[in-house]
Image (tube, rainbow, N blue to C red):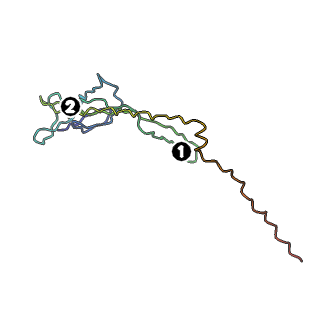
Amino acid sequence: MYAVIRTGGKQYRVAPGDVIRVENQGDGKDGKIEFSDVLAVSGSAGQIGKPQSEALVTGEVVEQGRGAKILVFHYKRKKQYKKLRGHRQGYTAVRIIEIAFDGQSFKAPELPKKQPKPKKAAPEIVEVPKAEAKATAPAAKKKTAAHKPAARKAAPKKKK
């Protein structure tokens, strides 16, 4: 079962459980978004039809963010005209939960709840008396300065 919806000036083919990135939609009611502009719905026998009755696609907001930066560069040759602008388009990631059409409802399977990771125990700090620390630490050797090579002499001048 899938549907074709239109939102943000684009069309998307969605099925229950799909995650799509659409133009900024806001949070919706309790993180749920309804897409009422349904263009087509697949039927039970593999047929695709335009919905005569009211079809509804419901999704939940997974994440909101901004896409990668797009550089817009205007340039006219021989006229010394250059203009550079950047743009980052906002998006809303939506997970399709349900497609309701003609009294039927197709729902996505529930995602398992994420278990929080157990916290690691802090390592124990053992204090060593200063006298023992000096005895156990190896003595640092003093480095000697590297011996510089002798300067090269200039070649003798030729006699005429």
21 to the left or right of 14: right
Image coordinates for residue 68, horizontal then vertical, percent? 43, 39
Q: Residue at x 84, y 72 (%)?
A: 156
Q: Residue at x 20, y 29 (%)?
A: 56
Crowding at label 1, few (<14), some or many (≥20) Cα neighbours within 10 Å?
Answer: few
Image coordinates for residue 49, horizontal then vertical, percent? 15, 37
65 to the left or right of 107: right
Q: List the residue tagged with mark 1.
A: 76
The correct choice, above or below, for 20 with respect to 29 in the image is below
Q: Earlier in the sequence, mark 1 or mark 2?
A: 1
Crowding at label 2, few (<14), some or many (≥20) Cα neighbours within 10 Å?
Answer: many
* Type of amino acid at the residue the image marks with label 1: Lys
92 to the left or right of 156: left
139 to the left or right of 95: right
- Foreground: 44 or 18? 18
Check residue 98 in the rendering and tell me which mark sits there, or answer none: 2
User: Outermost residue, bottom direction?
Assistant: 160
* Figure quadrant of residue 121: top left
Q: How many badges with numbers are in the image?
A: 2
Check residue 40 in the rendering and tell me which mark sits there, or answer none: none
Q: Residue at x 89, y 76 (%)?
A: 159
Image coordinates for residue 92, horizontal then vertical, percent? 34, 32
User: Outermost residue, right direction?
Assistant: 160
